[in-house]
Amino acid sequence: MMLQKILTLTTPTRGCYNITAEIDNVIKEHAIKTGLCHVFIHHTSASLIISENADPDVLIDLETFMAKIVPDGDPLWIHADEGPDDMPAHIRSVITQNNLTIPITAGKIGLGTWQAVYLWEHRTHQYQRQITITLQS
Amino acid sequence: MMLQKILTLTTPTRGCYNITAEIDNVIKEHAIKTGLCHVFIHHTSASLIISENADPDVLIDLETFMAKIVPDGDPLWIHADEGPDDMPAHIRSVITQNNLTIPITAGKIGLGTWQAVYLWEHRTHQYQRQITITLQS
Amino acid sequence: MMLQKILTLTTPTRGCYNITAEIDNVIKEHAIKTGLCHVFIHHTSASLIISENADPDVLIDLETFMAKIVPDGDPLWIHADEGPDDMPAHIRSVITQNNLTIPITAGKIGLGTWQAVYLWEHRTHQYQRQITITLQS
């Protein structure tokens, strides 16, 4: 069995947004016991990561890391039409993920105790982001 | 339903090669309406990314970024048997992707408007690269 | 067909551990000829990569790279409750992979000649790590 559902999410500004519950709801809605959940983001300036779910400082440090290795407004970047965060957003996306596949086990998303799924918005302005979830069982 | 097809591609030199049409052709050939498309590259010095499809400057900036964080010929690298781009190619592969899963929706590859799939060749010489596409519906 | 199996692995210290044989054994145990093998690690401070399988220096250079771009004990990191390798382990995980999907072809794991799957432990102490393998055919 394979089914797809589209989620549309608004990201007010740069940062990591926990979307674990949204994904788990789709799994539970369809009463899938064992399978795989595929999550895909249809953008090149926002990405998907699985990271630590307990301490918000981890999310701050992730931003600090990216600001250090891919600085906004670096004169190195040729592609800057949409501002100083334009090319950095593409690079941040390429070195993280735009697609994740996660086990479905015992009727729910099969993450570890300390894992959450985040939509990482890399642009500094507000965006609407589209995600396709594909469930397989 | 699950079927596999092998693509062999020649990469003349380092850089990003848009392989979206090649993948989409395999999907259309098999008339799959809804499903998943898995793309896997059988190498450790070339990788797969999804990135911006409109401005070629983005691809130049991706190279600039990698040249900065993983410089060719850096005396830090012990593994240099095949030249100054040998170890950097392995590192570039590890921090990008060697496998992608992409939705198939409405009979074609389910990418966003600005997304394309690229084979990123990290070696500076010409190579033949093998990719396995697995379609599921 | 879809089946899941959990592997528990002990990682004595930071480093890359070749888990290709463990994965291939699960595939062979279930006599799957053509399909996909999904590997998922349930942690945020260890990750999964596919890298070069022949020269151990590659694994040393991967550590050197990470030590350079994500230094342990960097005063930049706020999240340091579990020591100087705590936040670096999360960042290393985010810029590598926590899930891989690999073709199953001709009854075995469909890797290239020079590819192996590694569990990359990013913490410096000993850990038990749980991986879920999902096979599809």
Image: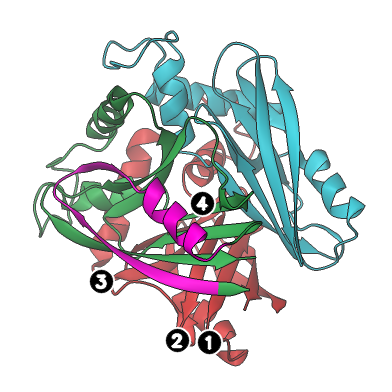
Chain colours: A cyan, B green, C red
Q: Is residue C89 magenta?
A: no
The range drawn in magenta is B3-31
Is any part of residue A58 visible from this angle? no
How far apart marks 1 and 4 lie (CA) works out to: 26 Å
Instruction: Indicate the position of residue A59 as horizontal and vertical percent values.
Output: 63, 28
- Of the residues under marks 4 and 2, which one precedes in the sequence? 4
Which numbered tag is attached to residue C33?
1
Secondary element under disc 4, as helix, strand or loop, is: loop
Which numbered tag is attached to residue C106?
2
Q: In this view, does B55 lie above or below C134?
A: above
- Of the residues under marks 1 and 3, which one precedes in the sequence? 1
Q: Which amino acid does label 4 sit on?
A: Gln
- For the residue pair C1 and C83, the one nearer the viewer reads as C1
How far apart marks 1 and 2 lie (CA) works out to: 5 Å
Q: Which amino acid does label 3 sit on?
A: Ala
Q: Are marks 1 and 2 on the same chain?
A: yes
- Of the residues under marks 1 and 4, which one precedes in the sequence? 1
Task: Tell me the subunit letter for badge 1.
Answer: C
Which numbered tag is attached to residue C54?
3
Task: Tell me the subunit letter for badge 2.
Answer: C
Number of other residues with Cα within 10 Å of mark 1, as a class: few under 14, some 14 to 19, many 20 or more: some
- Of the residues under marks 4 and 3, which one precedes in the sequence? 3
Secondary element under disc 3, as helix, strand or loop, is: loop
Mark nearer the viewer, 3 or 2: 2
How far apart marks 1 and 3 lie (CA) works out to: 26 Å
